[in-house]
Amino acid sequence: MTRWALPEYIADVLPVEARRVEGLRRALLEAFRAHGYELVMPPLLEYLDSLMTGTGHDMELRTFKLVDQLSGRTMGLRADITPQAARIDAHLLNRPGVTRLAYCGPVLHALPQGLNASREPLQIGAELYGHAGIEADMEIQNLLLHVLEIAGLKKVRFDVGHVGVFRALADMAALDEARSEELFARLQAKDIPALRQSLGDVAAAVRDALLLLPRLYGGLEVLERAERELPKHDAISAALDELRTLTARMQGAQVSIDLAELRGYQYHSGVVFAAYCEGLPNAIARGGRYDEVGKSFGRARPATGFSLDLKELAAVVPGHGAAGAILAPLDDDAALRDEISALRAAGESVAMTLPGHDKASWRASCDRELRKRGSTWVVEKIS
């Protein structure tokens, strides 16, 4: 094996892509700050029991594990920053009322999450704690739309669901945790034959309702069909009412209803959503309400948020980011030195030529150069 080979689904980020990723990171974090979200930086690894608190079986399968040489306890490399943000809100900040947090950092996945997905995403996200009303869900979804527009995505589709519908039906069917997990997997795959087979012992009305969920996908008319055809249940009615209110107030995106959209249902507790864009087979961002995670940390807190992979986003919007560097000749001219200092102070990258290297060797990193026109140094595009 060659020594420079990397593990599967792990890749270096080279200069041009890194510039795009860093440009997006700065722009999105600034948007979060402008909306009142405070930046936090959780550690890359923690004791496993802390990382797994309130996250369900799926997160355990995705987490790399190792033994701490100091304590002998099992540690995990985080697969998701969201539970860490919930821990910070519950235990370290411990504020009353509303708290808004943002974060950005690498996470590691034991297995890739989708087609061509990296096992080392650069996760960025925003979380809102302390408000149980639908206003918080609307704020989070509108913030996601805003940052995707900043990134340059114009045509965004939202698939919106509500785990309360599935949970109410699972309770009516008296399903234990293992059966619920099995049904969850088959619903996500929209595997109707396998779903029907696994529901053979469930009462007919509830079985028909669970079999209907994968077909409850489409426009806002899906909510009316769900109201007519699903069993009458307070939790189901409340979930459908929330979806009506939320989708009626969403602006700037095409909205679809998907009542089988349950990804992460083990810790989500209400509205869930996924954002899709042209050029990607997988969702560009996911989010939803997860009130029960704070309870798992010992402090029940309403919570909602979203996250996305910055590297994946940068691949879809390659034009985003700062321009390349400016090439400057190696010259003792005082006016040149002053111009280089001014350009660097203005945020430009200026690289000096070195002896023995022609201009062509710099074109990978430089797209402009300083040239002397008369007595003035000017920046011109490298042809």
Image (tube, grey):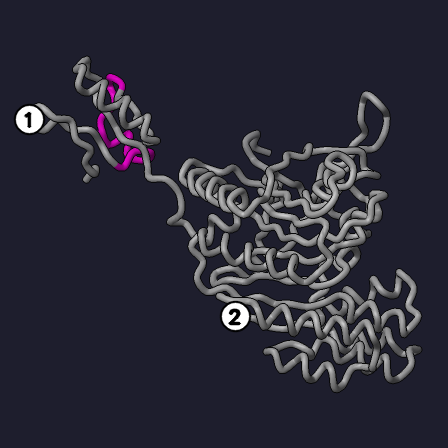
- Residue 366 image offset from top left, x and y in percent: 29, 33
Which disc is residue 374 wearing? 1
Tell me if label 1 and label 2 are in contact, CB under 8 Å.
Answer: no
Q: Quadrant of residue 367?
A: top left
The residue under label 2 is 254
Gap in angstroms between the C-alphas marked 1 and 2: 56 Å
Instruction: Please name the amino acid that badge 1 sits on.
Output: Gly
Mark 1, residues whose alpha carbon is within 10 Å: few (<14), some, or many (≥20)?
few
Assign the C terminus to one quadrant of the image.
top left
Instruction: Please name the amino acid that badge 2 sits on.
Output: Gln
In the image, is residue 45 above or below residue 167?
above
SS at circle 2: strand
Q: Is residue 187 a member of the stretch shown in magenta?
A: no
Q: Residue at x 53, y 42 (%)?
A: 33
Mark 1 and mark 2 lie on one chain; the one further toward the N terminus is: 2
Q: Residue at x 76, y 38 (%)?
A: 94
- Residue 232 image offset from top left, x and y in percent: 83, 81
Span highlighted in magenta in the image: 354-367
Assign the N terminus to one quadrant of the image.
top right
